[in-house]
Image (cartoon, helix red, strand yellow):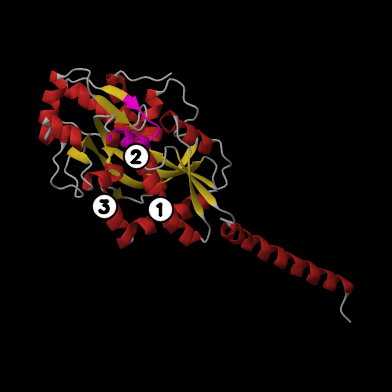
Amino acid sequence: MTHPSLITRRRAAAALALLGGALAAGPVLAQGAWPSKPVRIVVPFAPGGTTDILARSLAPELSKAFGQSFVVENRAGAGGNIGADIVAKSAPDGYTLLMGTVGTHGINKSLYSKMPYDPQKDFVPISLVAGVPNVMVLNSEKAAARGIHTVADFIKYAKANPAKLNMASSGNGTSIHLAGELFKSMAGVYMTHFPYTGSGPALLGMLSGDMDVMFDNLPSAMPHIKAGKLKALAVTSGQRSGALPDTPTVEQAGGLKGFEASSWFGLLAPTGTPQDIVNRVQQETAKALATPAMKERLLAQGAIPSGNTPAEFAKLIDAEIKKWAPVVKASGAKID
């Protein structure tokens, strides 16, 4: 007959074994539980711009990878600050992500006297999605009527017609706005700035003829350039874009030595989001951006896909904040 104390010890050992197995399986179960409902990607600008285009290109790929819907939500305003702040103050559970930009996480900290969020402390970087050159575009009909065919022509016309040109942008302090301010400063011309709530609405102003010039992100401007409705005078990057190989740089076409103003876009989450979720989203983002179909689509639009690591993206954000601070100061732009 088995001694009662031996039975007790065996039961205790069995209970400990079960408990140990449950604890060992715990992290796996927790990891597998996300996402159990749709994930939203907040775009802090209006529909139709490059931020929106990239988010809507990536969302279906992440939906397929995780078996849950990744839904794009546009929350425009204040140069991207409204949408970014919504994400910064969201629960850090992986169900709210931000498609951040050089504006929300590089420029705005120097531009706005009061920021509702800290671009570094309140976010954890996931991955850079793409880098994008801007492109200087005019309304094609107005450009033809004015005899403007090159950047040099534009500068000549602007100097002969001071304060008569309207410059559209996706919002105060965005890379599109500051590219225009940098151009004004270096070319010695004046243009009245009209900030919209995103590239989409600003492009409508360009297409209608209400606006004269815009330094838009290349992907959002590309369809209108191809359709002949917008005339691309130059790209704002240091080198020509493979998407518009026959279009010169601003430096080449206008003699503005050292002119360069490009944009970037990337995924971020609220600080405190579990690292395993961050890592999984980064890995699937990198996989999606590396597929031939996605690479071809983005490159054709003028975007250069990335998919870098959270640490690499964090270094980029830090460098961009330092880079744009003196540019904002020199431009004289400041928003209370």
Q: Secondary structure at mark 2?
A: helix
Pointer 2: what residue?
Answer: 316
Describe residue 115's horizontal placement relative to residue 212 as left or right.
right
At x 37%, y 24%, the residue is: 110
At x 26%, y 44%, the residue is: 224
Q: Secondary structure at mark 1?
A: helix
Residue situated furthest bottom in the rendering: 1
Q: Tell me the magenta residue range.
A: 194-206
On residue 299, the disc is: 3
Quadrant including the N terminus? bottom right
Describe residue 117's horizontal placement relative to residue 317 as left or right.
right
Q: Amino acid at mark 1?
A: Leu
How far apart marks 1 and 3 lie (CA) works out to 14 Å
Pointer 1: what residue?
Answer: 58
The 10 Å Cα crowd at callout 3, few under 14, some 14 to 19, many 20 or more, is: some
Residue 200 falls within the magenta-colored stretch: yes
At x 24%, y 29%, the residue is: 212
Is residue 195 visible to the viewer in this orientation of the structure? Answer: yes
